[in-house]
Amino acid sequence: MKTNAELFMEMCTMQEQTDQLIFKKTRMLAAPSIENYILAVVDEIGELNHELKPRWCWWKAQPGEVDWDRTLAELVDIWHFCISLMIHRTNVDPKEIVEVLDFERSALYCPVELLGNFASGWVGKSNLLSSFNTLIGWGNSFGLDFPMIYEAYKTKNKENNERAESDY
């Protein structure tokens, strides 16, 4: 059985390969800007927040139930953009991050916490570490451990590769 650290490193490798395919297929000369990565993360947080609406929507008499499969999918989308940002727009080596990630962390779902890591428009090791720990914490608090996140990431990564190959 692989460790959580090994799974994280595999996610980074998968993301690099997917990004290279996307960049080639879309004829990108450079990775997206930090600002565009941040906007992508904001967009995905919005989608995650929408999936979690039954947990916080107090004004509806019957807000419905959280679809945990869709919630996991949206959480994984945020992982994709954060890993891609780390790989292409920072000088941070994923090995530096994985050594200090807290895979047992639990965190209250608070999107502002994650967004605050990117508020300055600058991204470094401390911002990334905080962001990844926040994502791990959200997953754990939703009952989604890191191997579950990894498996969903792997599935979505395959889908992203297929989309890129088909000129999505």
Image: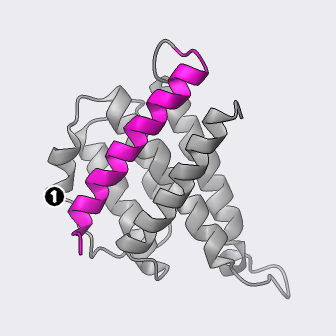
Which residue reaches farthest right?
Answer: 61
Which segment did they paint magenta? 1-28
Tag 1: amino acid: Val
Give the prevailing secondary structure in the magenta stretch.
helix
Q: Is residue 111 left or right of residue 82?
A: right
Residue at 69% x, 68% y is 51
The spot of residue 83 in percent (x, y) is: 39, 44
Q: Residue 85: where, in percent of width, then height? A: 41, 36
Q: Is residue 146 magenta?
A: no
- The location of residue 6, given as percent across then percent down, is 23, 60
Query: Mark 1: which secondary structure?
Result: loop
Compared with residue 84, is residue 91 higher up or lower down, i.e. above or below? above
Q: Quadrant of the N terminus?
A: bottom left
- Residue pointed to by mark 1: 100
Residue 118 in view in this figure: no
Above or below residue 17? Residue 146 is below
> Depth check: 130 or 90 in front?
90
Q: Which quarter of the rendered picture does the C terminus lie within?
A: top right
Image point (34%, 55%), residue name = 132
Q: Is residue 68 left or right of residue 78?
A: right
Answer with the quarter of the image where residue 133 lies.
bottom left
Q: Residue at x 69, y 35 (%)?
A: 166
Q: What sort of colour scheme is used for the picture?
A: one colour
Residue at position x 49%, y 12% from top?
29
Q: Is residue 29 visible?
A: yes
**Residue 35, placed above or below residue 46:** above
39 or 60, nearer to the observer? 39
Q: Pinpoint residue 5: horizontal percent, then vertical percent.
A: 22, 61
- The tally of labels here is 1
- Quarter occupied by residue 135: bottom left
Query: In the picture, residue 84 is in which quadrant?
Result: top left
